Amino acid sequence: MPEKYKDILFLAAVSSFLIFYKLGEKSLTTWDEILYAQMAKEMFRGGDWLTPTLNGMLRFEKPPLCTGVTAFFYSLFGISEFSARLFSALSGMATVLVTYLFSRKMFSRANALCASLVLLSSLHFFNHAKLAGGQHRARRIRIFSQILKKGVFFSGNQVHKLINNL
């Protein structure tokens, strides 16, 4: 098995253990977690997977994708704290893995492992990967998409340089 896949499996195992450990044990604590979990519950019970509501009132402050995915997790695992936080945990884990892939492509294997583990050990990132709230979730998705965009940009830039050197 190539080193790249060993590293990805290692990071997936470490990040899943750290992020998913006791994920649904504590009750929802911040108003953000409670608010977005309730919106997902209303979406799940109402059957309208595109229109987020809170106490029957339309609520379009955030895009409905995260709320809809959380409602989907409610349908799979039941309405619980674990289901409410699962999308955030998966987003945090994906961010660690994309950080590794991007750093490995741009720098080296050692730098990529270091960058991924530093991100995972960052208290702010780690705490937000375990929260179900909307603002925290939006930040994680923004970080994930920025890393992904930079990786695609730099990959394309390297291909462009390669073509020009031919």
Image: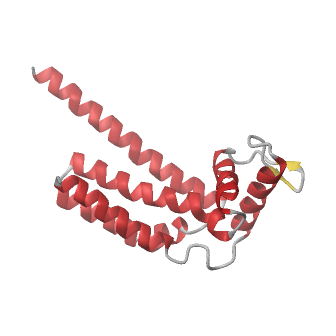
Residue 98 x, y percent position in the rendering = 36, 51
Q: Nearer the viewer, residue 103 or 2?
A: 2
Residue 70 x, y percent position in the rendering = 66, 55
Q: Quadrant of the C terminus?
A: top left
Picture mark count: 0
- The quadrant holding residue 113 is bottom left
Q: Is residue 132 visible?
A: no
- The quadrant holding residue 122 is bottom left
| Display coloring | secondary structure
Residue 156 x, y percent position in the rendering = 29, 31
Q: State the residue at coordinates (32%, 63%).
A: 11
Q: Is residue 101 visible?
A: yes
Q: Quadrant of the N terminus?
A: bottom left
Q: Nearer the viewer, residue 42 or 156?
A: 42
Tell me if 69 is positioned left or right of 89 in this view: right
Tell me if 36 is positioned left or right of 53 in this view: left
Q: State the residue at coordinates (60%, 67%).
A: 131
Q: State the residue at coordinates (78%, 47%).
A: 52
Residue 37 x, y percent position in the rendering = 72, 62
